Amino acid sequence: MVQVNLQTNILGANELIARKNRVSFKSQGILVINLMSSPGSGKTTILERTIERLGEQVKIAVIEGDLYTDRDAQRIEQKGVQVIQINTEGTCHLDAGMVTSAYEKIDKADLDLLFIENVGNLVCPAEFDLGEDFRVVVISTTEGNDKIPKYPLIFHEAKAVLVNKVDLLPYTEFNLQECQEDLEKINPSAQVFPLSGRTGEGIEIWCEWLLGEVRAKGRNS
Ligand code: MG
Ligand code: ZN
């Protein structure tokens, strides 16, 4: 009997394309962030606030991964930055090849920062390297504290974790300290930013850190 390990083959092919993406991103000096979360955690809202805060100093573009719609892409476009939409037609994650195609369509002149908003899903996006510099994961207070212990891989690989919807803390069972302790166990080096995309609380601190990362990438390439 012949058995094919499909998972390994898919990921192996993805890894090769991701490496090529990484080389292209580096040669252009663009910081590329893979932004991940479960659906409804507030990735797009955080991007809107981030563009409002940094858009004057940093040239930003966004690749929007979505199952079927362009709703998030339209919201980002209204902020005046370049957006390339990827509709995955039901595939629940982005892969490196999709990002290559989208990246080809971006005007790279003077671009400093590229966000890739992944499909809302805490499972398989973590398995697919897109060639990004690093990953940022959003968890929101309305999701409860279980997400970090239940989906450790995605949190383990994040350089920063944004704890969104802190304005709703009084109305949820979410325990911020427990969240920070869970992250400390899984990923002690992660930067944790409690914030609210809705009220803007904490956005300044996240954007200061992000600006430092953008400048560091610019210097190193
Ligand atoms: Mg979104
Ligand atoms: Zn998937």
Image: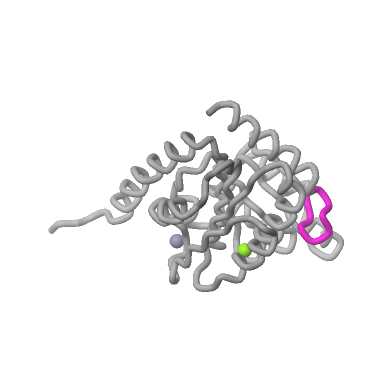
Q: How is the image coloured?
A: one colour
Q: Quadrant of ligand 2?
A: bottom left
* Residue at x 59%, y 47% (from the top left corner): 155
Judge left or right: residue 70 versus residue 201. left
Question: From which residue to which does the magenta span run?
Answer: 195-202
Residue extending farthest to the top is 220
* Residue at x 50%, y 57% (from the top left corner): 123
Q: Is residue 197 magenta?
A: yes
Q: Nearer the viewer, residue 75 or 109?
A: 109
Main SS type for the magenta part?
Answer: loop
Residue extending farthest to the left is 1
Q: Nearer the viewer, residue 119 or 218?
A: 218
* Residue at x 73%, y 63% (from the top left corner): 142
Q: Nearer the viewer, residue 51 or 43?
A: 51
Judge left or right: residue 71 versus residue 165. left
**Residue 156 visible (yes or no):** no
In which quadrant is the N terminus drawn? bottom left
Judge left or right: residue 107 versus residue 202. left
* Residue at x 80%, y 56% (from the top left corner): 166
Q: Is residue 35 magenta?
A: no
**Residue 37 visible (yes or no):** yes
- Find residue 13 and report its horizontal and vertical position in percent: 31, 48
- Find residue 144 and report its horizontal and vertical position in percent: 71, 60
